[in-house]
Image (tube, coloured by chain):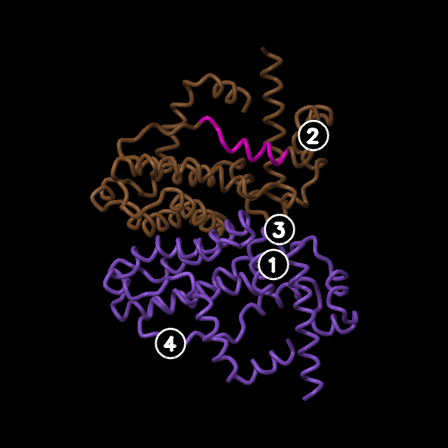
Chain colours: A brown, B purple
Amino acid sequence: MAEQVRAIRTRQAILAAAAKVFEERGYQAATISEILASAGVTKGALYFHFQSKEDLAFGVLNAQNQNLVIPDRAIKVQGVVDIVMLHTYRLQTDPMVRAGVRLTMDQLAQGLDRSGPFRTWAMPVREGLERAKSQGELLPQIDPTETADVIVGTYAGIQSMSQALTDYEDLVSRVTALLRHLMPSIVQSSVLTSVDISESRGQNVYNEAFAHSQSVPEAEVERAAG
Amino acid sequence: MAEQVRAIRTRQAILAAAAKVFEERGYQAATISEILASAGVTKGALYFHFQSKEDLAFGVLNAQNQNLVIPDRAIKVQGVVDIVMLHTYRLQTDPMVRAGVRLTMDQLAQGLDRSGPFRTWAMPVREGLERAKSQGELLPQIDPTETADVIVGTYAGIQSMSQALTDYEDLVSRVTALLRHLMPSIVQSSVLTSVDISESRGQNVYNEAFAHSQSVPEAEVERAAG
């Protein structure tokens, strides 16, 4: 068991180093040697966990999805907003998430499947919208599949603009502006007044989800390894 | 004058080749040798017009802005929609515009000022929204600066998603979906019913703007050189 924890710890150290190098240099310019040097592990250890640079990039992309679970909400649209706000908070605070976004948006990373992350993100958003629709929260013309794609695509652009203009400093205010522009076209106005899209929402949801993740065994291993 | 036309023609050939290479390979992987080979001009001719790869990239970015002028509209919000729809049409049909977008979104092109294009695009959109606001077309809470940034940022993401998923094949339908989600939060509903955001709008605006550009002398030189 101690060995298993050590292996997880090594894997986490490699991923953290890969995230740093990918974020700073981009996929194509990044080299395994740089990641090795930054991780402080042996070449053998790295290749035990990851076969190639592409493998490392997929590892970083997958590591974005931690054990953070947003509790079920009475208003289902709030759950959709919370996915967006939680990601926004993590994007500002977690290098792994920033590296994942850089890899996703990085059009030079032609060896990677760039469509994957768009699809991965659209899925929980669509499911949330479907639950909201079945509760009568959405305007009648809304198609959850189309609207989920609009939310994911527009979010990708807003974060990219925030990064280009202010290195994510104004991300939260740009994302709340986005939601103020989208939600009235999606949600019944009687529901909208009870949805929290304030700037502090992301951190609050993170604290809640993190507290919840502490009761999950895998998360404890991760924290021990982090 | 013939010499001047020839110089313009050479410059256009170099820019067309640069656009092709930048779009296919990205800024960092692209080389001046590739651009030279594709343009079929001498090295001397290329360096007469462009000093460096960065210079070529700026040339492509600037070449996006042609002489296409959208006529003034009675409903000012229609003018804003038309900027978006015209760009969408050109993105699907003009390699120079596609290369410009690739360079803009390309986070590896760290030598270039990536914030410029966001600002460049936000300006005409904001001006259009200001005119719409002064005519009472917008909802009272709308701040044209914020909303212009939302339109430009969301558009950037939607085009990126369309490129990643379908290589721009579904771009027009994704953009009209975007407008259907944004416009009701921006425009008075009494005005909205008279705004055309149909899928054919982009091509119609292009035809109109192109016909208009034929009366402008510089455009004639460009066509001769094209």
Q: From the top left corner, tell me how far across and down residue A149 is, in percent.
A: 43, 45
The image quadrant where one finds the C terminus of chain B is bottom right
Which kind of residue does numbered mark 4 sit on?
A: Asp
Q: Mark 2 — residue?
A: A51
- Is A166 inside the magenta-drawn segment? no
> What whole-number distance in Å separates the C-alpha atoms at marks 4 and 2?
58 Å
Which kind of residue does numbered mark 2 sit on?
A: Gln
Q: Mark 4 — residue?
A: B72
Which kind of residue does numbered mark 3 sit on?
A: Leu
> What whole-number distance in Å separates the C-alpha atoms at marks 3 and 1?
9 Å
Q: From the top left corner, tell me how far across and down residue A81 is, in percent.
A: 35, 40
State which mark lies toward you, 2 or 1: 2
State which mark lies toward you, 3 or 4: 4
Q: From the top left corner, tell me how far across and down residue A213 is, in percent.
A: 42, 23
> What whole-number distance in Å separates the C-alpha atoms at marks 3 and 4?
38 Å
Which kind of residue does numbered mark 1 sit on?
A: Leu
Of the two numbered discs 1 and 4 on the same chain, state the one appearing first in sequence. Answer: 4
- Seen in the picture, residue A136 relative to B222 is either above or below; the reply is above
Chain bearing tag 1 is B
Q: Which mark is residue B165?
A: none
Chain bearing tag 3 is B
In the image, the segment drawn in magenta is A56-67
Viewer-nearest residue: B142 or A185: A185
